[in-house]
């Protein structure tokens, strides 16, 4: 394809939505950036991490979060100079192309600080507020999950690769459900009360500490569902696309789409991601429990 053709393809894609070779190129870039940050974060981890509190004393950012976000911005700008950027640690730039890259450089920062393996780099690119391609890469778990809208979701791990598909679970009482908790004590109190309501009604609960990984595990059928209140778009943009392309359903508690042209940095309400056989049951369970514990 000549440069002109690729630019023509760019313009055409934007008018009719992003598809075909551009979507695949964006998917490749999301994997390249996520894995590049993964190498940086593991190979350059210092003996001592500088820790600064954000919204609460336990909501921490390290120098590695900030450095990785800068690296993501540089890598993307080299390949897609006209695209916008929105990062967890404050990087923002407007888009001249209609595409915006949304990056959580370390999802699961607490796990990264403690040396627990459940942390990941999450990279997504959105067009008109809807993820077109995305990647969640976990260096410590040797896992790279990625998806292109309309092209399915795949995982590469331990030298092999396979398509992702959500579980066949049809009964919420036998469902393994992931969740997470916010950083504010008040929110954690209500989230703790809610999870206590759910525990006897599902198979079990898992709390790993990284939304992007929880979402990948729903896409892989390793969890039957996941819910969490108070995420930001950088936590879920790539993982939600992976769930959808793996055959799962992702909505808000009110059964609304999680894709919004706003794609702001604000906190979201509760997100429900699940295999199709239990999404409605999980949403009802969480909704009823939230009403009882409000
Ligand atoms: C994390 C989320 C996780 C939530 C954690 C934390 P961070 O994001 O991915 O689902 O339960 O409390 O918010 O702050 O590590 O990027």
Image (cartoon, rainbow, N blue to C red):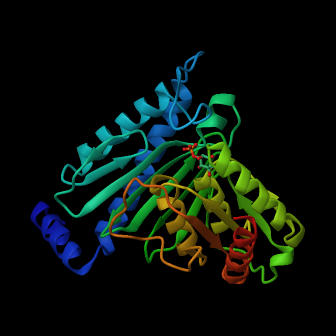
- In the displayed structure, does residue 120 sit left or right of residue 178? left
Residue 23 seen in the figure: yes
Q: Residue at position x 60%, y 31% from top? A: 57
Which residue occupies the foreground of this view, 121 or 268?
A: 268
Where is residue 293? Give x, y as percent.
Answer: 74, 65
In this view, 192 is above or below 59: below
User: Quarter-wise, where is residue 11 in the image?
Assistant: bottom left
Quadrant of the drawing holding the C terminus: bottom right
Q: Who's the residue at 53% across and 26% down the image?
A: 43
Q: Residue furthest top?
A: 47
- Res. 125 image quadrant: bottom left
Residue 116, image quadrant: top right
Q: Position of residue 59 (x, y in %)?
A: 57, 36
Q: Position of residue 290 (x, y in %)?
A: 70, 68
In this rendering, would 261 be left or right of 39? Answer: left
Residue at horizontal 69%, vertical 29%? 114
Q: Which residue lies most toward the left here?
A: 4
In the displayed structure, does residue 202 sit left or right of residue 113?
Answer: right
- Name the image quarter holding the N terminus: bottom left
The reply to whether residue 164 is in sight is: no
Which residue sits at x=68%, y=65%?
A: 226
Q: Is residue 75 above or below residue 197?
A: above
The location of residue 123, given as percent across then percent down, is 44, 52
């Amino acid at each position: 394809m000549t440069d002109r053709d690729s630019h023509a393809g760019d313009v055409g894609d934007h008018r009719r939505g992003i598809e075909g070779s551009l979507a695949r190129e964006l998917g490749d870039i999301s994997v390249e950036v996520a894995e590049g940050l993964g190498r940086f974060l593991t190979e350059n981890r210092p003996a001592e991490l500088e820790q600064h509190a954000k919204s609460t004393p336990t909501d921490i950012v390290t120098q590695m979060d900030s450095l990785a976000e800068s690296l993501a911005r540089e890598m993307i700008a080299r390949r897609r100079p006209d695209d916008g950027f929105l990062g967890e640690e404050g990087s923002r730039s407007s888009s001249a192309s209609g595409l915006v890259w949304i990056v959580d450089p370390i999802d699961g920062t607490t796990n990264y600080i403690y040396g627990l393996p459940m942390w990941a780099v999450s990279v997504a690119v959105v067009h008109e507020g809807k993820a077109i391609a995305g990647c969640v890469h976990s260096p410590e778990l040797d896992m790279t999950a990625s998806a292109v809208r309309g092209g399915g979701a795949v995982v590469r791990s331990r030298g092999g690769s396979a398509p992702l598909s959500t579980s066949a679970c049809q009964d919420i009482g036998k469902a393994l459900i992931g969740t997470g908790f916010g950083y504010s004590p008040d929110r954690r109190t209500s989230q703790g009360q809610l999870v206590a309501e759910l525990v006897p009604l599902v198979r079990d609960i898992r709390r790993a500490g990284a939304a992007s990984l929880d979402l990948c595990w729903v896409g892989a059928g390793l969890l039957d569902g996941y819910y969490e209140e108070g995420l930001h778009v950088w936590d879920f943009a790539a993982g939600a696309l992976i769930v959808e392309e793996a055959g799962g359903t992702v909505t808000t508690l009110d059964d609304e789409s999680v894709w919004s042209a706003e794609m702001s940095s604000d906190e979201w309400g509760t997100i429900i991601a699940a295999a199709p056989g239990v999404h409605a049951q999980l949403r009802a369970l969480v909704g009823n429990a939230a009403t009882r514990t409000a």
